[in-house]
Image (spheres, rainbow, N blue to C red):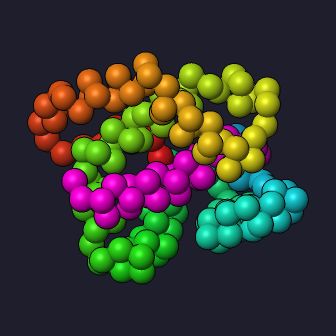
Amino acid sequence: MSQEDTNAIKEITRVFAFEHWARFYFAVDREGKTFLDAPEAALAQVREQAPDLAPLLERINNTELTYETSCTNVGTFVCELLDGVKYKPGLVQRLLDSRPYRMEMHLFSLWLQGHEGYLDANPQTFPGWLEMYLNWKELDQVKEYIASLEKTPPTVGKGSDAVH
């Protein structure tokens, strides 16, 4: 995998993690449907701390959240932000279907599951959330797990175990 691919996967993961963060803290139930309801203070904080991601939060705020809309919104935003802009056209789509990207999203999902209680009890800004995840990946036990994943043969067929 090239350094460009590695960098792009990090940036793609950052966008997906951001959308997870927004849903984690700002999803609300309205008459049996889930909506994103980020207050203006959160929007202002994101505009300051992650200005490249603020348009995504603005786009999805006050909208109904479903699996399909989340996938569409985040996928579209990732392509708008990175594909043909920061990276050559088609690279982002290729990486979204790649094993390294699926592994990264698997790791993110494991981290989120393992830290859900803490994150719930101790609300974090998005930069804080991302820093916690990146620090977790530096733990020896996690590095060993990553190495074991990298040694296993890819699964047959095309599919994604990514969390969207």
**Stretch of the chain drawn in magenta:** 1-30
Quarter location, residue 90: bottom left
Residue at coordinates 79% horizontally, 31% vertically from top-left?
122
Quarter location, residue 152: top left
Find residue 19 and report its horizontal and vertical position in percent. 59, 52
**Is residue 139 positioned above or below 161 on the image?**
above
Q: Is residue 43 visible?
A: no
- Queried whether the magenta region covers residue 20, the answer comes back as yes
Tell me: 153 left or right of 41.
left
**Is residue 14 positioned above or below 115 on the image?**
below
The answer to which of 77 and 138 lies nearer the viewer is 138
Tell me: 146 left or right of 68.
left
Q: Which residue, as the protein is rendered here, is positioned at the far top?
A: 141
Tell me: 143 left or right of 57.
left
The answer to which of 34 and 4 lies nearer the viewer is 4
Residue at coordinates 60% horizontally, 52% vertically from top-left?
18
Residue at coordinates 39% horizontally, 59% vertically from top-left?
7
Find residue 46 and report its horizontal and vertical position in percent. 74, 61
Quarter location, residue 53: bottom right
Find residue 31 and report its horizontal and vertical position in percent. 75, 43
Find residue 129 and report its horizontal and vertical position in percent. 66, 42
Residue at coordinates 46% horizontally, 75% vertically from top-left?
80
Dominant SS type (magenta): helix
Q: Which residue, as the protein is rendered here, is positioned at the far bottom?
A: 85
**Is residue 81 positioned above or below 30 on the image?**
below
- Queried whether the magenta region covers residue 116, the answer comes back as no
